[in-house]
Amino acid sequence: MTRAVRAARRLGAHVPPPLLVRLSALWHGETALQRRLHGRSAPGSPLGRDQPLSGVARLDAALFAALDALQAGGVPCAVLEAGTMRRRVVVVTGDHGDAARRALAATSAVVQPVGSAVLRLHHGDPAFGCDVEIWPLVGSGPRPDGGAYVPGTALAPRANRWVRYLEPGERVAARGQVGGQDVPTYSGLLKPHLLDVDFPIDVVYTWVDGADPAWQRRKEQAWVALHPEHHHPSAVTSSRFASHDELRYSLRSLETYADWVRTVYVVTDGQRPAWLRTDHPRLRVVDHRELFAGTQALPTFNSHAIEARLHHVAGLSEHFLYLNDDVFFGRPVRPELFFEASGLARFFLTDALIDLAGPSARDLPVASAAKQTRAVVERLHSRTVTQRFQHVAHPQRRSTLEQIEAQLPDELEATVRSRFRSPSDLSVPSSLAHYVGYASGRAVPGTLSYLYCDVTERRAPIKLQRLARRRDADVFCLNETDTPGGHPGHRLMVDFLESYFPRPSSFETGADALRRPR
């Protein structure tokens, strides 16, 4: 770390966060005046606010715009890449490079050079663009693999997952399907790839409206009936049940960046957000009475209990993602980030370690649950675990959860019947399922770019400003610790989410849905 960086950090520690945010915006040219002077829009706002955000549709739209422009200019081309949530790539051979540049320049879309041989066409967000690659032609000569090029071979200007070069005899025109439309390609391309996920993946959210008076009365009655000294105070803290409309923005993030999801299930306690389109063909609301049928465990205010029953959701796919509503997708993500194409689930560890003491009422519930996970793993497999998991979208195998229920019926029943978080709880999909899945050959460690932000911490504004500028997190979590006397974290969270995800999704009432090709 340089002396200047250290000095800047020391100075930043003494500057009030609001002033630090303004100074950072000025430094990076992000003030409203600077944007007007340079003709730039705010991050995330290049499209109209009334347009839905189907990521798949936007990728396809960029591809079709590029193909239309090239074909109108009489430029032969072929689609190289159109995988799920991958930026589309079109090949143009070098002898048609100048014509391709002229054809793309005539479009109304934004066209940006990416190096000397790639042109990126997009409609306001480069993440959803289409890359037109100009592949230079070469004469005879040695190939890096020891062979020799055939004269007229087209060379890829950068690495891709399909082919490094195309000989003249391999550039056989063919037709493929992308987004329900015929597109030009070469014979042998646009085939299903063995390493691409091809099975359905659902999403399950758990959601509660903690401001609902009827729900508050049920919670108070249930709490009075228990012995509070046996639970950590955070088990009923207000922030655990607070709603800042996070679900609305999490669904926007899903439709924007993970639109390959099949069905979204929202698990609630007889509640529904007023804005939620419950008639949406890809969404189903699951009531606690359905989820806990036959258990006599209701009412419950324990997220561990609810999580322990998720595999009982009717119609749920074998592979699914479990999300709290404070988790958001921050940029385009592919199914392979969460699952291997072979079916293995991935899990995401942190550097946070589990202390050696046993679970107790002194622990935060999340710490007690981690210790319970360790005890179960040691009992089942005679080996220990030491790390916790990132608070992200948790990839799940339904069969793993069923295995846990069969192996640990008493422990699962105790968790399900615990109306509030307790030191004896098991955290099943967020923790135990990952380790059991690994031990049984159903899960493997993975990595992703992740940000956690407690919106009540001092540097939260600058952390969120940096995220909005870089947009470099696959997944991020905005959480709120319980702060006596209130905190401006609520306003900060809502303002940030509205700026990052300004346009409504098709899951919201009043929003016109972009129909995805099926």
Image (spheres, rainbow, N blue to C red):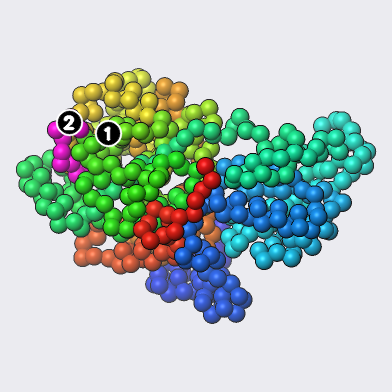
Q: Nearer the viewer, residue 462 or 405?
A: 405
Image coordinates of residue 507 in percent, x first then y, are 39, 53
Residue linked to disc 2 = 295
Crowdedness near tag 2: few (<14), some (14–19) or many (≥20) residues, C-alpha within 10 Å:
few
Local crowd size for mark 1, using a 10 Å CA cut-off: few (<14), some (14–19), many (≥20):
many
Q: Which residues are magenta?
A: 293-302
User: Which element is circle 2 on?
Assistant: loop
* Residue at 41% in and 27% down: 437
State the image coordinates of residue 168 (x, y, percent, origin top left). 86, 38
- Asked if labels 2 and 1 touch by Cβ distance under 8 angstroms, the answer is yes
Three-letter residue code for mark 2? Thr
Compared with 489, 166 (above or below) is above
- Residue 468: say if magenta: no
Q: Which residue is mark 1?
A: 309
* Label 1 to label 2: alpha-carbon separation: 10 Å
- Residue drawn at x 24%, y 42% is 287
Q: How many marks?
A: 2
- Across and down, in percent, residue 226 comes to 8, 41
The residue nearer to you, when weighing 355 against 209, is 209
Compared to residue 361, the image places residue 410 above or below, namely above
189 left or right of 401?
A: right
Callout 1 amino acid = Arg
In the picture shown, does residue 459 fall above or below 177?
A: below
Q: Say what secondary structure mark 1 lies in.
A: loop
